[in-house]
Amino acid sequence: RLGSEVLARHPVLDGLLNNAGTFDGDYTGSRVVTAEGNEYSLAVNVAAPFLLTSLLLPALRKSAHARVLFTSSMSQGSAGVLDDPQMEKGWEGHSAYSFSKLANAMLAVEMHARYADPPRLTVNTMDPGTVDT
């Protein structure tokens, strides 16, 4: 619903900052699974921004200089879970978060390779640094 509402109000978009972030099983300290069966950090931090970006691509492509940014983190890592991205074996909150931020960086690289048209549309990742939230 968000994608269609944004497109209705903004037929041209110059930028999109995907800054979703949840940590440690939505701060429960336990592995949380969405109704769709996805590990919560992966769903919120990666799948949702990917879906929103995909839905908004038509408006981004209409801009003369659109930028898409995915927030990553200096703590990105946990590449060892690539064979178990849902972390069904050995879930740990920080590892889930770290993997989701690694996945965001990988997603930005892949979306740039598939959809970018510099300088009209670029897709990048960034690390905001340590934020006291």
Image (cartoon, rainbow, N blue to C red):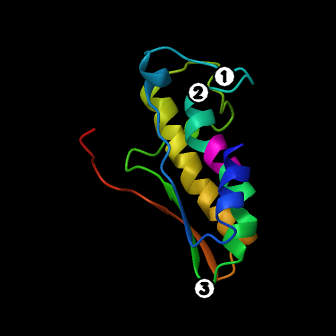
Question: Any magenta on residue 48?
Answer: yes
Q: Is residue 42 above or below residue 11?
A: above
Q: Which residues are magenta?
A: 47-51
The quarter of the rendered structure image containing the C terminus is top left
| Residue contact between numbered discs 1 and 2, judged by CB atoms under 8 Å | yes
Q: Position of residue 122 (x, y in %)?
A: 60, 74
Is residue 78 visible in the rendered structure shown here?
no
Tell which circle, 2 or 3, labels the residue nearer the N-terminal end: 2
Query: In the drawing, what numbered circle is on residue 121?
Result: none
- Whole-angstrom CA distance, mark 2 to mark 3, is 34 Å
Query: Could you classify mark 3 by the number of other residues whose Cα lies within 10 Å: few (under 14), some (14-19), or many (20 or more)?
Result: few
Q: Is residue 96 above or below residue 108?
A: above
Q: Which mark is residue 34?
A: 1
Label 2 CA crowd tier, 10 Å (few <14, some 14–19, many 20+): many
Q: Which residue is mark 3?
A: 119
Which of the 4 image quarters holds residue 112?
bottom right
Which residue is found at the position 70% from the left and 59% from the top? 7
Residue named by callout 2 = 40
Q: How many angstroms separate mark 1 from mark 2 (CA)?
A: 6 Å
Q: Nearer the viewer, residue 105 or 81?
A: 105
Give the amino acid at mark 2: Tyr
